[in-house]
Image (cartoon, grey):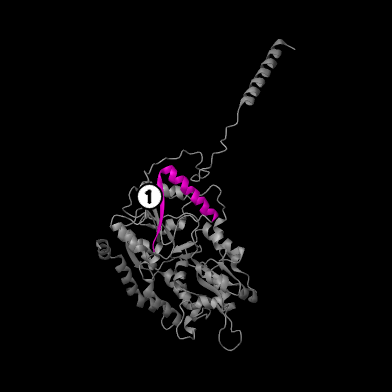
Amino acid sequence: MSKGLLKLLTLMMVVVLVVGLAAGCKKDPVVDPTEKPDPTKTPDQTEEPDEIRDLDGRVIKVGAWWDMSPDEGSPFGAKQAARREVMQEKYNFEFEFVSTEWDMVNETYSSSVLAGEPWADIATLEDNWLVSHVRLKEVTPLNDLFDLSDEKWDTLTKDITTIDGKTYGVASGKWWPRGMFFFNKRIFDDAGIPYPYELLESKEWTWDKVEEYAKKLTLDLDNDGTIDQWGLGGIDMDVAMVFANGSEMITYENGVGTVNLRDPKAQAALDRFYKWRHTDGILYNKFDYQGEEIPWDIAKQEFQNGKIAMFWYQYWSTDDFYEGMADDYGIILPPIGPDDPDNNYKALVTGHNFQTIPANVANVDDVAFIWNKWTEPFEDDDEDAWKEGHETKLRDLESYDVLEYMYENDCFASIGLFGSSGAHEPWWGGQDDLLKGEKTVAEIIDEKFDALQGVVDDFLSDEEADEEADE
């Protein structure tokens, strides 16, 4: 062996030995077994330095028409309670959860803001109430206070609380379902019609498909010349169809509200509703009721009693169906209208609630900072935890899949100014006229149009806003 090669091999052995010794001397990091995880942090935040704020003992009030304090008897509430203790000590403040009656929220919100002492630093509102408070400058825009692109904020709330480019509300987690479509499984089985679940993702669940099914399911079961089983029924279904067809009852832009019933998509929706009742004869008519006074929810009662195959209304109806309906039922999203430019399912939303920061709240940066920390997802959150609230609503796994599809694909449409302005009340007569069939759709729209626009104009009038602000 040459001396050069021998030197090279010797050098290589020294290098290996040094590297080995270095590796052997490396120690694992010391972990303190008494150290507890910080409930205010999520996995993504763990490595980031936390901003420390001293709120100097401030009380932050969180208000709603129910008690929003953590329910320590539930797994999620227990985690919230632990987070509250950590946050209050870490940032030197105290949470106070306050509540008032639902029908007192708006008055309490306005009067306390005008007095310069908002009743809550984080205050819950419904979508129908927001516009009037924004017009009175009683709500703080949140665009500069939160990162609204964060995935924890639900898209529905961001959409319906954004007015003229400013966002006034936030909510975390899954929003509660509102508009929904139900079907009676026994009736479908008897007719040999497959459940509509399989049509959802392919977007074949359309008005045409509903019409096809309803014609097969509208039957005179005892051959006495009277329909005993209706293919379709609903409450406020005409309004829901306007939104499902890609239109709105009232548009709102730059402070101006305009009745939108002459929009071709809106009129087409009402035309189809009228056709289903008077041409096809597949839509249940409350005026067929034989009692002295027609119950406002007679169509819901008839579906629950197994006399209507498909029912279009609100998800909360499951409160009655789950325990009170003998036949099995399923839920599906409202069908897609033929003129909807989005070609997406649209569950009509009204009564959705979210959190706001009232005007005149002191040190809003601190309030937003705390609320942002409070609403962070927990590290060990179960992705399916949202399903727990539906266990006494739904009877099959496919219905959960429908809700999941709704969340993942933003299947919603807000009722907007039609609900908040009170314009829905003069439209009740229009709904009755659509069912009675004594006037055409165009005549009904012409007859109701000015009254509806008048209600909207009064609601949005600067004079009215000024008078309320002066009170």
For the residue pair 364 and 99, the one nearer the viewer reads as: 99
- Left or right, 401 with respect to 164, comes to right
According to the picture, the residue beneath numbered tag 1 turns out to be 59
Q: Which quadrant of the structure image shows residue 296?
A: bottom left
Q: Is residue 279 above or below residue 151?
A: below
The question of residue 247 being in magenta is answered with: no
Residue 89 is covered by the magenta coloring: yes
* Element type where label 1 sits in the image: strand
Q: Residue furthest top?
A: 3
Q: Which residues are magenta?
A: 74-100
- Judging depth in this view, the residue of 74 and 200 nearest the camera is 74
Q: Looking at numbered disc 1 in the image, what kind of residue is underneath it?
A: Val
Query: Would you place residue 200 above or below residue 56 in this image?
Result: below
For disc 1, the neighbor class at 10 Å (few under 14, some 14 to 19, many from 20) is some
Residue at 64% x, 20% y is: 18
Question: Left or right: where does residue 28 sit relative to residue 256?
Answer: right
Counting from the top left corner in percent of width and height, residue 114 is at 28, 58
Quadrant into which the N terminus falls? top right
Split into 4 quadrants, where in the image is the C terminus? Answer: bottom left
The answer to whether residue 17 is seen in the rendering is yes
- In the rendered image, residue 340, in percent from the top left (x then y), is placed at 47, 65
- Residue 204 placement (x, y as % from top left): 57, 66
- Magenta region, main secondary structure: helix
Residue nearest the viewer, comparing 344 with 40: 40
Q: Quadrant of residue 166?
A: bottom left
Q: Residue at x 52, y 48 (%)?
A: 378
